[in-house]
Image: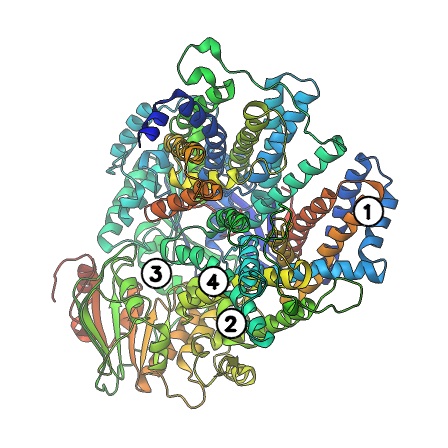
Amino acid sequence: MSDLLDLLGSSAYWVAVLRIATPLILGTLGVLWCERAGVLNLGIEGIMVAGAFTGWLAVYQGLPLWAGVAVAALTGATLGLLHALLTVGLALSQHVAGLGITLLATALSYFSYRVSFPKVNTPPTITPFAPMDWLGLPVLSAQTPLTLLALALVPVSAWILYRTPAGLAVRMVGENPQAAEGQGLSVAAVRTSAIVGGSALMGVAGSFLTLSAFNAFFFNMINGRGWICVALVVFASWRPGKALIGALLFAFFDALQLRVQQMGDAGIPYQLYLMLPYALSILALVLVARRATYPQALMKPYRKGER
Amino acid sequence: MVDAPVLRLSGITKRFGALVANDNICLALQRGEVLALLGENGAGKSTLVSILFGHYIADEGTIEVNARPLPAGNPRAALDAGIGMVHQHFTLADNLSVLDNVVMGTEPLWRLRSQRAQARTHLIEVAQRFGLSVQPEALIGGLSVGERQRVEILKALYRGARILILDEPTAVLTPQESEALFRTLSQMVQEGLSIIFISHKLTEVLRLSHRVAVLRQGKLVAQAKTADTNQAQLAQWMVGHAVDAAPRRPAQSVGPTVCDIDSVSTTGGLRGRLNRVSLALRAGEIVAIAGVSGNGQAALAQLLCGMQAAASGVITLQGEPMRASPAWLVSRGVARIPEDRHTVGVVGDLPVWENVVSERLRSTVFSRGPWVRRAAARQHAQRVVDTFDVRGGGLLGPARSLSGGNMQKLILGRALLPPPGEAAPLLIVAHQPTWGLDIGAVAYVQAQLVAARDAGAAVLLLSDDLDEVMALGDRIAVMHEGRLTEARPHGQWSRESIGLAMAGAAHAS
Amino acid sequence: MHLEKRSSTSATAFLLAPLLAVLVTLVISSLLVAWAGAPVGRTWGLLLQGAFGSVFAWSETLTRAIPLMLTGLAATVAFKARLFNIGAEGQLYAGALAAVAVGGLHGTEGLPGPVWVLFPLMMLASAVAGALLLLGPALMKARLGVDEVVTTLLLNFIVLLMVSAMLDGPMKDPTAMGWPQSVALQGELELTRLIERTRVHSGLIWALTLALGLWLVFKYTVFGFNVQALGSNARAAAFAGVPVTRTVTLVALLSGALAGLAGAIEVAGRTSYVTLDMSPGYGYSGIVVAMLAGLHPLGVVAASVFIAGVLVGADSMSRAIGVPTYLADVIVAVSLLCVLVATLLTQYRLRWR
């Protein structure tokens, strides 16, 4: 028990928590924007893979790190545009379109990686973001600038969502698209913008892994983090502040299981610890299920003129 | 001197595939005028105003507002031109506040900060000017139907609408709320607004409007100053031939109680609650329940259709306690006609024949063990289709391709015509059975219900059409806020007393 | 741009749509091949040859198609009832593990009993394992309204970790040189080969029979009607007396069981062991199979052969001229999206403002 308290007191632990939380914050915000506009974006897992790959590739080709982040965002935005075309333009099933995009983005990324680096045994590396020693704050100094970006985007998202006309428009198309149409808004334009923006965030979330947490692109790098973000959005009741809390809570337990694994008894197989994040996500969903106030138009395709 | 009309529609034509919804319609609206757009269901009224507001684009024709052409298919352009629309099914987001709903779309999207304080002040000012009360921060989800309609109206007035379109505004209001609405409308006219309202209620039209335009099957068949017409004339224009009021056919012989509802209450949500409702349904009699929809009729229908169980109280069917199971009810001879034929009455993607036998598939008539007896099922479906004249697509076409009237006939036939070897239904639960049908189909459905009654069934009719209630009900009860008045014989009610009971006054229970 | 429902589905649209889908898939994949620096025509030739060019090629394709048929049927059953079972991958592994648990050689001998008892028991165990795995998310959806997509997805990861733990521990093969694999299946319990010196096994018969059976169920049984009504319009189905919870439960059990059987048949027919990489995403590909087949059980057979052909052909082609095998995954993903769009366009017309 005292081991545990020592662990929680060590700053290294909290550094890990923030590091693990960063892609989750970005990804969850991305899903939040899409779902607030009424669209379930199951392409997140694939978009994160694609963002991780393209961002890293851009840096490998010589671009500065922030340009790599921009490339990842652009990749996410493009995939988001495809998703919007399928689900908003063509009103296809959001589940299947999203899964199709995950499959496509993942396959394209792996294919491109193999074509670019056909015969490598160890993955090629880049120089990732450096920790922000100049900041002088505990725990935060050990993070990279992308973490600051993620943390800053939470209040920014909340502001846009609740205090600006654009945010109100997004919320309205997610609650009652007919009402939005009747007030002169283009539901298609607002939804597409929300999906593209949210997907850009997902791309950046992916790039965090290759440009900050690690310095190379691996297969199976994302490993379900995208799905966890989808669960976290429900847990967060579609609110940016709660999304941050959810991501931090999750990262807390994820970091914990890593550490406990290292100091734990040999009797418990390590796989059990690795299961914890996924099991916790399911638990979170179950706990919140009853009280969840969904955006009312979520997952209902809107066909203009069909009344 | 004649002013230029504030609104002019010229040659508006709109087709949906083979159906001509609007056929070369020409109308003009003067300033300060109330124009009633009258017509049966399906005549093209809603299509026309949707074109006006920009939800649809007309295939031919032009619209001019204050002599300037209006861009088509653009609600924003319509709003900017001063046209506001109060939709029949309110376009409000439940999870957002009144202010949110009103303000949305009025500020440019690139603005970094929404100016809510100013908006709130402006909203309150507009509300006061037109004599409406408003709570800007209230969530729509918690408002009553009348309050929601006021928000719909305020949305238009807030944006400075000078031409207001109201689509069947009194369909969901009590007589008292309707009066309040009429006062608001006259206030608007005094402020110089011009109003188009859609209705199929002749009394309203005669009372409120300066002019009437009648649509029939997409064409504008008549226009007149309201003062120059009367109810009979309007009805004739609407239907195309002289309409005789069908003579009432009272019940001949009333039998024993088939279903007894004793002090039943329900909990729960959107459907409204029931509060210690008691009613006895007897063979050979139609009990009609009047009331503005939303007062608990849906809860009662849900109970008797087996979709919900009562929280307290007892319902017995021929002495047996009633079970909340559609299959059980069907097997005991209960025929159910749901309110929403498209989303509850049929499974649209499945073929017509499967929908006809859907309620009885589990019985031995149409199944042998796990297997469906397809031949027997199709045979019965054909009988139903022939007897009830269900047209469109044959047995194999998907049910959603049927028109509203034919779909209702399918549902009626399914409920009323028993399969070979089964007895005729002993209780019929009909929830808004004629909603959205044209006059011919309405007459057919009503005749079927009367015929079933004459054959010995007990009929419960829930309808928000007062005319229908008075025409069919042998006994009438009124539902208000979950409470049911005593079911008194037809002769003991008048329109006035029913209207009062609908609003909650004169509680006799 | 908006969609307008067609008044009638024209026959030309119906035929043109899948053709268009194939064409677009071909174009996009060819662009990728060209980018990889390989000759496009030759690549396609090698792919087709590797998939369908010889008896051996066919046998490989059919072998790969077997688990796809089963996971495809699993997805078809579930999706028809609007139960989005994305957990077939985990259910497959669970079924495989259960099969080996019952039929494996623990020590030097397996469980006692004659083959005609053990074999059905083994199959039953795998079906039950898969079924139970899906039951949880299905009940969570029915009782609590928890979206089953995320729960089944997350369960996949959990199951795979569980299998890994089992392979490191209780079910470890004592003879394997450190490579994580399970105990082997008893020889007598393996499925027979259909064609000599190929890997095609009698699991194919199982899969085809199940496809036929499922088609009969949907067309001729009350349960089949219940499922279709429920998936199409749950409220109307409830109103008509369809027992909703019971139907959803049965659908979940059936879908999970089919995916579990896929795992058992893979073990009994192809691998004899359970390894962590025995399924290259069959569970997920099964969803693509089901969508391509339009949720029709017989169409699943054709779609699974198509996708298996793409996978096998790409492997063979890749060995010959080096275009990465991920090309197959791209082709599959693009086909899915193209077929979705094409199907939509048969029912709706695209109207530009």
- Asked which secondary structure carries label 1, the reply is helix
Q: Are marks 4 and 1 on the same chain?
A: yes
Is the residue A54 above or below the residue B90 in the image?
above
- As measured in the structure, the alpha-carbon distance from the residue carrying label 4 to the one carrying label 2 is 12 Å
At mark 3, the secondary structure is: loop
- Is B263 left, or right, of A62 in this rendering? left
Which callout, 4 or 2, points to the residue nearer the camera? 2
Specify few, some or many for label 1: CA neighbours under 10 Å numbering under 14, 14-19, or 20 or more: many
Residue carrying label 2: C225
- The residue under label 3 is which amino acid type? Asn
Which residue in the protein does label 3 denote?
B230
User: Badge 1 sits on which subunit?
Assistant: C
Res B237 visible: no
Badge 4 is on which residue? C233
Instruction: Say which chain tag 4 marks.
Output: C
Percent across and percent down for residue C276 are 60, 49
| Residue B23 place in picture, x, y as percent | 56, 55
The answer as to whether the residues below labels 2 and 3 share one chain is no
